[in-house]
Image: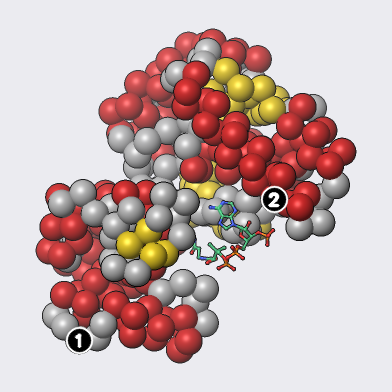
Amino acid sequence: MTQLFVAGAGLMGAGIAQTAIVNGLDVTLREVDEALVNRGVDNIRKRLDSQVAKGRMDAAARDAALARLHPTTSLEAAGRADFVIEAITENVDLKRELFKRLDSICRPDTILASNTSSIPITRLAAATKRPDRVIGMHFFSPVPVMELLEIIRGRETSEATLAAALELGRKLHKKPITSLDYPGFIVNRMLVPFVNEAIWALMQGIGSREDIDAGARLGLRHPMGPLELGDFVGLDVHLYICDVLYEGLKDPKFAAPPLLRQMVEAGHLGRKSGRGFYRYAPDGTRVPD
Ligand code: 3HC
């Protein structure tokens, strides 16, 4: 059985781990301290409980899935993994440091994947002595729900590594697309200008936040409007991706709107901070201003 090691038990890491255990994989989920790893496990347990309550999963399947989840604070536990997926905070220095450590801990044949939404895979691979076995596996939030898996080939990624990532994606029941390692890959290259255009429209008073979002929901059949989606992803995360795209491609269409930067500077990061374009209760539900 594939031994998967997921580094980071935040929204994305816990979502990846949940998807993997439900699909029969054995998963070691690692965070830097007990409190963070326990929070990740609690979130997974709550979501599986809710699947059972909705009649989508039986209690025995939930218990079997949870028995495949092994929480840890030890990075050394990655020594037993066939496949590592890194899903820590979106910071290039932290990720490079982690890849360097994983490279020294993991077996030579272990594949190191990153869930980064914007950091070049080639830059992460260069922190290791196995750049041919480093690849991007970009999941979408909420991971257990979204079908897409964007697979990114770094400059040195081998065919065998690509094949293994595609195989893992199939085991997770995701639908993969593959991208070359250029800024924003495929999806964020499309998403960033779209969300930014909505923010410019709001900033210039062209429409209210509700009308801008309704435009995309009702007129384009998007499940969420672009401002709601920005709040959902996190405005700090969105700004980071804008900056990577703008720096990498030097095209003004990727420049962050001033309103976005101002909101992030004010700490209005979207759902996770309780305030973004809209207001949220601690459980993430929308509340009136
Ligand atoms: N984690 C896990 N599951 C979640 C969840 C979460 N945070 N939020 C909702 N869900 C699940 C619910 O449990 C429910 O599952 P079920 O059908 O098995 O019961 C299902 O999603 C639908 O949830 P709801 O009925 O509560 O709500 P909605 O029907 O309004 O759907 C949504 C919520 C799935 C989030 C939907 O609004 C949606 O698809 N939004 C767009 C999401 C999107 O575009 N994501 C991509 C973001 S971009 C990205 O991630 C890339 C990055 O690089 C920026």
* Residue at image coords 50%, 19%: 34
Q: Determine if the C-beta at disc 2 is less than 8 A from ligand 1.
A: yes
Q: Is 231 left, or right, of 40 in this rendering?
A: left
Of 284 and 143, nearer the camera is 284
Q: Is any atom of residue 3 visible in this view?
A: yes
* Residue at image coords 32%, 49%: 273
Disc 1: which residue? 206
Residue type at mark 2 is Ser
Q: Is any atom of residue 84 visible in this view?
A: no
Q: Is 6 left, or right, of 265 in this rendering?
A: right
When the figure is inspected, residue 212 is found, relative to residue 70, above or below; the finding is below
Disc 2: which residue? 50
* Residue at image coords 82%, 33%: 64
Residue type at mark 1 is Ile
* Residue at image coords 55%, 53%: 142
Where, quadrant-wise, is the N terminus in this rendering?
A: top right
Q: CA distance from mark 2 to mark 1?
A: 40 Å
Picture coordinates of residue 283, whole percent (x, y): 47, 51
Category of crowding for the residue at label 2, using alpha-carbon neighbours closer than 10 angstroms: few (below 14), some (14–19), many (at least 20)? few
Q: Earlier in the sequence, mark 2 or mark 1?
A: 2
Toward which corner of the image does residue 81 lie, by quadrant?
Answer: top right
Toward which corner of the image does residue 88 lie, by quadrant?
Answer: top left
Where, quadrant-wise, is the C terminus in this rendering?
A: bottom left
Picture coordinates of residue 120, whole percent (x, y): 36, 42
Picture coordinates of residue 272, whole percent (x, y): 37, 49
Looking at the image, how many numbered discs can be counted on the residues? 2
Picture coordinates of residue 157, whole percent (x, y): 50, 37
